Image (tube, rainbow, N blue to C red):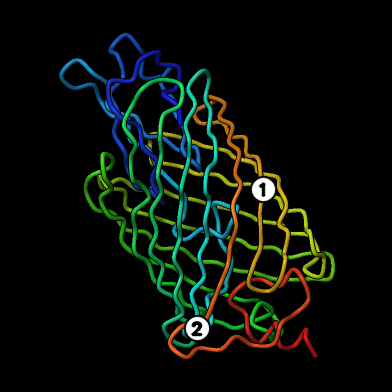
Amino acid sequence: MGNGGAENVAGPVALADVAVKIQCLIPVNVSLREVAAADPSGRWLVLPRRAGVVFITLLCTPAAAYRPFDGTDAAVADVKEVEIELQPAGRLQQGADKRLIGPAIVYNYGFAERWELVVQGQGETPLSEPGVSSLTEAGVFLKHVLRPGVLQGQSGLSIATEFGALLPGINAERGVGASWAAIVSQRWDWGTVHLNAMTSLTRDQRGDFFFDAIIEGPSTWKVRPVFEVFSDTTWQQTQTYSALVGAIWQVRDNLAFDVATRYALVNDKPVSEFRLGLTFGFPIEGGQRSAEADPGVVFGNAAERARLAR
């Protein structure tokens, strides 16, 4: 996590989820145009100077992003099944400023057919200079598959929606925001594509618009390459362009490891990030997973796993 070229940070900078805000103090001798900083999505909002300092608010990724992406797919956890997305540690850098990103946890629970509850949070610690750790990206969301499709073992597009509340962090962002996203997924023999469109009301009541495209390699490959590009616009404030390249190793249908590197431009300021994590799932409350499928099957798709297992 960076301070956009500022040499001294007077307060903690924290990561946040979709349109979540985090404030940090930057010396007054840094111009607003020169200040640009980054989070996992690389989106920042610069606010007016107050009391001799510049306040910076960090915008963030869509709720319950599908690892290792900023966007997500049109699938949910099976009924009475838990899926956990975990990043033990990652690294983000802008200029000389470096940040430890982690642990980051997303808890997904399938509480009803085609419905999922998502609870998430993320730790963030400065590495390049002393500073306090923060708990950010706090949020609670609901995700619903509107149209079962190829990701659910049926034909055609999988279509889902995700919406929820952005909650206060610890040593980090204040206020409450909200987000809503539409997700469309389609799979072919050569790979899978996920498209995201999200709008959010940020914690300081500003509009944010996020458009994302994810491309995965063939779902039958045990290790598949993955790519992502997105554009994020904070109304009359910032413009971010980001690209990610990585790989997912599908060990079995309920365990996958991921690695990725991301490069972004935030108001023309470069940001780089390294991500390393895993996703695992297990049934609870008498839930039972469906038959195992070939490597590469997306989590939370029991029908698809059963179809491929036949």
Q: Is residue 140 above or below residue 159?
A: above
Name the disc covering residue 259, or none: 1
Q: Quadrant of the C terminus?
A: bottom right
> Where on the picture, by quarter, is residue 288?
bottom right
What is the number of callouts on the image?
A: 2
Give the mark nearer the N terminus: 1 vs 2: 2
State the residue lying farthest toward the top. 29
Q: Is residue 295 left or right of residue 205?
A: right
The secondary structure type at the circle numbered 2 is loop
Between marks 1 and 2 in the image, the one whose residue lies nearer the viewer:
1
Residue at image x 54%, y 25%?
268
Which residue was labeled with disc 2? 114
Instruction: Characterize the local packing of mark 2: few (<14), some (14-19) or many (20 or more) Cα atoms within 10 angstroms.
Output: many
Three-letter code, disc 1: Val
Return the x and y of residue 286 as percentages of the image width and height: 47, 91
> Where on the picture, by quarter, is residue 109?
bottom left
Return the x and y of residue 160 as percentages of the image width and height: 52, 73
Q: Is residue 278 above or below residue 302?
A: above
User: Could you give the CA–CA distance between mark 1 and mark 2, rounded to whole angstroms?
Assistant: 28 Å
Q: Is residue 158 above or below residue 278?
A: below
Residue at image x 25%, y 50%?
168
> Where on the picture, by quarter, is residue 274?
top right
Instruction: Characterize the local packing of mark 1: few (<14), some (14-19) or many (20 or more) Cα atoms within 10 angstroms.
Output: many
Q: Is residue 99 left or right of residue 310?
A: left
Name the disc covering residue 140, or none: none
